[in-house]
Amino acid sequence: MKQLALFILLFFLFFFVQAQNPEPLFIGDKAPNFLALDQFEHRFSLKDRLENGPVIVVFYRGQWCPHCNRHMSHIQDSLQMILDAGASVIAITPEKGAKIEKTMEKSGATFSIIYDENHRIMDKYHVTFKLGGWKRFIYGSAGININKASGNKDNALPVPATYIIAQYGIIFSSHFNEDYTERMSVKEMLEVLSKME
């Protein structure tokens, strides 16, 4: 009987217990710098890009996520307005290059997208969380293999957060919601950028 109780407890822990919730960076915090290559093999340095104006940093989960593809598509549709406001966009994902290409196909995105190897950037921005056993089971049943797409072994995904970083390197505005269906709209981005002029 004790063995059965232990088995049930272990089953519960594996399938239902989630990792601790990530905590966001806040408005006024210094934005961590990062250096990486985008999907075009172009070097991206946040510090260097900020010399040209504000930067919108968008974290997305992957090409398998329809909410992410829709958000990326909305950004692309209004990209010229964002650029005209003096800002640039960088999207960050735990997915590798072939999956980024699928995101580009599905969303039409032409702005820079970075594969965040070993979720180093995600960790710096406090958006990383580990997919729990039950959700892994559900995602796996739908044919979604988080680890295969990322090359990692820890089922890490980002909260789909958006940070708008001012030229002086401080977070001016942010959207951080663990409900992956909620995103910062392009309208909100443009409103923030208008206040930064």
Image (cartoon, rainbow, N blue to C red):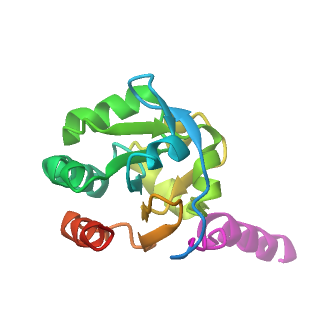
15, 145: nearer the viewer: 145
Q: Residue at x 60, y 74 (%)?
A: 23
Q: Residue at x 42, y 51 (%)?
A: 61
- Residue 2 falls inside the magenta stretch: yes
Q: Nearer the viewer, residue 36 or 140?
A: 36
- 65 up-or-down from 96: above or below: below
What's the magenta bit mostly, secondary-structure-wise?
A: helix
* Residue 161, position as x, y percentages in the image: 43, 64
Say if the magenta span includes residue 163: no
Question: Residue 191: percent from the left, percent from the top?
Answer: 23, 72
Residue 71, position as x, y percentages in the image: 25, 56
- Identify the magenta region: 1-25
Left or right, 195 with reference to 4: left
Quadrant where the N terminus sits is bottom right
Of residues 180 and 36, the one nearer the viewer is 36
Taking the view exactly as shown, the residue that stands out farthest to the right is: 2
Picture coordinates of residue 182 (x, y %)?
A: 32, 71
Q: Quadrant of residue 56?
A: bottom left
For the point 21% across and 63% down, the residue is 186
Given residues 105 and 186, the one toward you in this image is: 186
Q: Is residue 175 visible?
A: no
The C terminus - image quarter:
bottom left
Whether residue 91 can be seen here: yes
